[in-house]
């Protein structure tokens, strides 16, 4: 039944502009840009946070305190999103998907500007938390629009686009933070905007935040002028209004035509006679023994109806797939925050001692790899192996690829070798991260009941928000504990946590069997 409902949109290359029947290229581009802006908003502090915290704490900060405070700052927005994602999903079932995108982009713009202007750690973390409360609806809306507009094949293609946007944004956010942080200390040092007492000199983290805010504004404009509503209730209302306008336009303002009235009366009489004949036919049919078969069919229909009305949280396949998707998000975000903390830490603490603008280059390379793979190779992989197998392959291959990141510490005295190791490691992790995350999202949409898809995506977004808040915090705490120890090879210990997590989640997916 759900699969049949999803066949309303099969081909995303269709140029049709009919709401609820297809997504044209312009709408896909608008959704892609919304995902990009949202991902930059979420991930820009992953790199920015550790440098902000080191700046706020100065020489008084230890690796333990820096790791703890960095994890909290990076997790604040996601923790807030966890509190409101399900609420926004339920609200979207009442008001539609498009308003959620608009509210989210406005909130992202205000919040990220406040972060860039924050004079201290308290203001910084409050700005992230308050922004997260209102931006969680973006992810809910985008996933729900795709689920309402695409069949399984179309979802793969659309999720490939959206995941590429999230991936590019997830890499672009930290890259923007690395390249544009403290502009007065490198590329803009001689410009008038870096004069004594200027904004960029007083607030060295404002410029990357300004870029993120501009992206959110463009996302808002695309919502207003490009995006169309996908909620069936509102698309049906539009269709009914359209037909009503056509019918009303055919009625003239003249006095009623007697011939027309006579025709209507005859039509009504004929309809009444037909109804009486149907009632008599039904009465005769009830006395026929063959009616028992139809009664059985009606009972089967009622069972199917009852099954369709069963709440999503009472369906084990839905809750298991959501939990597994949440675990992937947890360990991926753990790794996303752990990597910049490790890269910025002093070599004596097991880190690489890299400034922000140096660390930006391997992140940018990862973004390019992700964009190419998601657009040209991932759709072919899922077509060949299917979503479930792609997810398991991505998780299992993530385990050995993570090892290349702490291994870069071996070449800390040789910059080119250290950078090369980071390029390879981040590139591989990026590919396998895409395979796991994108496939997990499609699996959730596939097993979810279509009539409750908004609530399911809201609950999934809540779980993922919890994972995005816990992951960075754990990364900061675990790194701080290991960095302050005297254990040999201590830089490997925090990364082992993500490796164990990926392997464990892959085992969970081995016991999942998707319905035919």
Image (cartoon, helix red, strand yellow):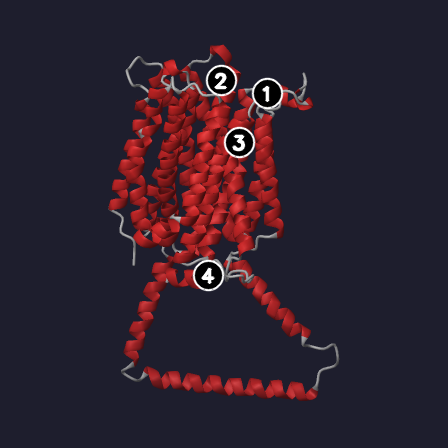
The answer to which quarter of the image holds residue 463 is top left
Q: CA distance from mark 1 to mark 4?
A: 49 Å
Q: CA distance from mark 3 to mark 4?
A: 36 Å
Please tell me whether residue 84 is drawn above or below residue 194 in the rendered image.
below
Please tell me whether residue 240 is drawn above or below residue 375 in the rendered image.
below
Can you identify the residue that label 1 sits on? 119
Mark whose residue sits in front, 3 or 2: 3
Q: How packed is label 4: few (under 14 Cα within 10 Å), some, or many (20 or more)? A: many
Lower sequence index among marks 3 and 4: 4
Lower sequence index among marks 3 and 1: 1
| Quarter occupied by the C terminus | bottom left
Mark whose residue sits in front, 1 or 4: 4
Lower sequence index among marks 4 and 2: 4
Label drawn at residue 54: 2
Label drawn at residue 504: none
The answer to which quarter of the image holds residue 241 is bottom right
* Contact flag, marks 3 and 1 (Cβ < 8 Å): no
Can you identify the residue that label 3 sits on? 176
Find residue 125 and report its horizontal and vertical position in percent: 52, 26
Secondary structure, mark 4, is loop
* Contact flag, marks 1 and 2 (Cβ < 8 Å): no
The residue at 45%/23% (across/down) is 70
Mark whose residue sits in front, 3 or 1: 3
Can you identify the residue that label 4 sits on? 9
Find residue 332 and report its horizontal and vertical position in percent: 37, 35
């Amino acid at each position: 039944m759900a699969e049949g409902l999803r066949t309303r949109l099969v081909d995303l290359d269709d140029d049709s502009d009919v709401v609820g029947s297809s997504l044209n290229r312009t709408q896909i581009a608008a959704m892609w840009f919304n995902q990009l802006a949202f991902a930059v908003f979420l991930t820009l502090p992953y790199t920015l946070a550790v440098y902000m915290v080191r700046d706020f704490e100065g020489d008084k900060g230890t690796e333990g305190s820096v790791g703890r405070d960095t994890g909290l700052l990076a997790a604040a927005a996601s923790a807030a999103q966890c509190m409101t994602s399900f609420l926004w999903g339920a609200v979207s079932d009442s008001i539609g998907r498009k308003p959620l995108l608009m509210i989210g982009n406005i909130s992202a713009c205000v919040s990220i500007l406040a972060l860039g202007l924050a004079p201290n750690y308290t203001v910084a973390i409050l700005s992230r938390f308050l922004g997260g409360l209102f931006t969680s609806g973006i992810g809910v809306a985008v996933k729900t629009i795709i689920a309402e507009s695409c069949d399984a094949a179309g979802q793969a293609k659309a999720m490939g686009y959206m995941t590429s946007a999230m991936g590019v944004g997830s890499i672009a956010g930290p890259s923007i933070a690395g390249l544009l942080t403290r502009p007065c200390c490198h590329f803009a040092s001689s410009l008038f905007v870096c004069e004594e007492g200027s904004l960029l000199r007083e607030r060295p983290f404002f410029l990357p935040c300004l870029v993120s805010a501009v992206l959110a504004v463009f996302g808002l404009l695309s919502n207003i002028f490009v995006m169309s509503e996908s909620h069936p209730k509102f698309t049906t209302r539009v269709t009914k209004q359209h037909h009503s306008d056509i019918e009303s336009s055919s009625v003239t303002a003249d006095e009623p035509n007697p011939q027309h009235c006579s025709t209507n009366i005859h039509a009504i009489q004929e309809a009444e006679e037909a109804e009486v004949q149907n009632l008599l036919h039904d009465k005769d049919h009830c006395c026929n023994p063959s009616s028992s078969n139809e009664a059985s069919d009606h009972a089967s229909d009622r069972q199917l109806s009852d099954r369709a009305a069963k709440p999503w949280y009472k369906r084990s396949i839905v809750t298991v797939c959501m939990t597994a998707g949440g675990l992937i998000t947890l360990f991926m975000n753990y790794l996303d925050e752990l990597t910049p903390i490790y890269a910025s830490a002093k070599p004596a603490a097991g880190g690489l001692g890299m400034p922000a603008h140096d660390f930006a280059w391997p992140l940018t390379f990862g973004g390019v790899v992700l964009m190419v793979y998601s657009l040209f190779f991932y759709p072919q992989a899922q077509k060949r192996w299917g979503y479930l197998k792609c997810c398991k392959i991505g998780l299992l291959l993530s385990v050995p690829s993570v090892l290349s990141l702490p291994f870069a510490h071996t070449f800390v005295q040789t910059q080119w070798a250290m950078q090369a190791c980071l390029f390879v490691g981040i590139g591989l992790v990026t590919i396998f991260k895409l395979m796991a995350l994108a496939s997990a999202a499609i699996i959730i949409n596939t097993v979810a009941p279509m009539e409750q898809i908004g609530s399911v995506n809201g609950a999934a977004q809540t779980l993922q928000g919890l994972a995005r808040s816990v992951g960075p915090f754990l990364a900061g705490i675990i790194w701080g504990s290991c960095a302050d120890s005297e254990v040999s090879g201590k830089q490997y210990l925090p990364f082992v946590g993500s490796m164990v997590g990926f392997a464990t989640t892959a085992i969970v997916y081995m016991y999942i069997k998707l319905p035919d």
